[in-house]
Amino acid sequence: MTGYLHSIESMGNVDGPGVRTVIFLQGCRLRCKYCHNPDTWPLSGGTPVQPQQIVEKLMRYKPYYGAMGGVTFSGGEPLMQPEFLCECLRLCRQAGIHTCIDTAGVGLGEYDELLRWTDLVLFDVKHEAAQEYKAITGGELTQVQPFIQAVRRAGTPIWVRHVVVPGLTDGAAHMRTLAEYVKTLPNVQRVQLLAYHTMGIKKYDALGIPYPLKGTPPMDAHACKQYEKEWFAAYAECEKGEKDG
Ligand code: SF4
C-alpha cells in the first residue's frame, strides 16, 4: 500500500498536544485563498512511501513525545489518501503513538474506519457560511457534513482551527456567527484562531500560480488575540442562551 508524502516535520509543537511529528501528505481538492502549501495539491506528486516506513520513522522520535505528544497527519488534505492513512493510523495506535489528523473534512470517505484509529481531530473550519466558504475554498460547505457526522458517531475529540485573514475572516460579526457554527460541531474541546501569514507566496511564484490574496497584509498577532477573546465571549453567549432557552 503506497502513500504519497510531501514532507515530515520531525518535532513540531503547534499541531496538536505536546511534541509531535507532523506528516504532510499530498493531495487536496480545495483551493483555499490563503493556502501556504500549494505544492501539496496534486495527489500524484511527492515521495512514494509505505505505512510501515512511516511508523518506523516515528518510533525513532517516540521517546520525545512524552505523555501528550505523538503524530499528526496533515497536508494537503490527509483524507485524500484514506487507505494509506488508515493503515498508518492503525499501526501507530498499535505502537502506542497518539494519533491526530489535521483536516478540513473534505476527502474521499471511509471516515468511520479512519476515526477508529484517530485520537484527536484538528478540524480546520474555513467559514461557517456557504457563500463565503465557496469564495474562500472553491468548494461547497455541504461537503464537510459526512466527515462531521462520522466524528459525531465516533465521539472523537475536536480542536477547531480557523485562519483569521484581514478583510476575509475577521471582524466581530464573523466571530459571532463562527461561534454559533462551532456550537453545532460535536466534541469540541478547544478552539484556536490562527493569524494569516504570507510565507507561502514564494511557493506560488515558484509554481507559476497567481497568488489569490496579493496585497492582503499578514494578520496582526495582537489583533488576532483580540478576535479570539471576542470569539470566546460570543461562544459563552451561545452557551448561556442554550441554558436559558
Ligand atoms: S485545505 Fe489546506 S491544503 Fe487544502 S487548499 Fe486549503 S489550506 Fe491548502
Image: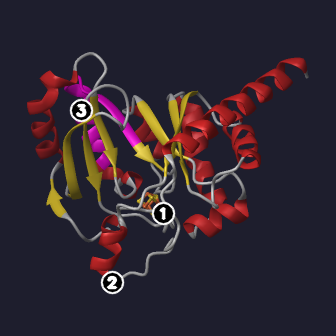
The residue pinned by badge 1 equals 34
Compute the Cα span from label 1 to label 3: 31 Å
- Is 37 on the left or on the right of 7, as rendered? right
First in residue order: circle 2 vs circle 1: 1
Q: Nearer the viewer, residue 169 or 66?
A: 169
Residue at 36%, 69% in the rendered image: 201
The quadrant of the rendering that contains the N terminus is: bottom left
Q: Nearer the viewer, residue 67 or 163?
A: 163
Label 1 crowd bin: few (<14), some (14–19), many (20+), radius 10 Å: many
Compute the Cα span from label 2 to label 3: 37 Å
The residue pinned by badge 3 equals 92
- Is 9 on the left or on the right of 198, as rendered? left
Q: Is residue 42 visible?
A: no
Of marks 1 and 3, the one in the foreground: 1
Q: Is residue 109 visible?
A: yes
Question: What amino acid type is highlighted by mark number 3?
Answer: Cys
The residue pinned by badge 2 equals 208
Up-down: is 147 above or below 59? below
Residue 192 magenta-drawn? no
- Is 81 on the left or on the right of 2, as rendered? right
For residue 142, what is the image quadrant?
bottom right
Residue at 32%, 51% in the rendered image: 83
Secondary structure under the numbered disc 2 in the rendered image: loop
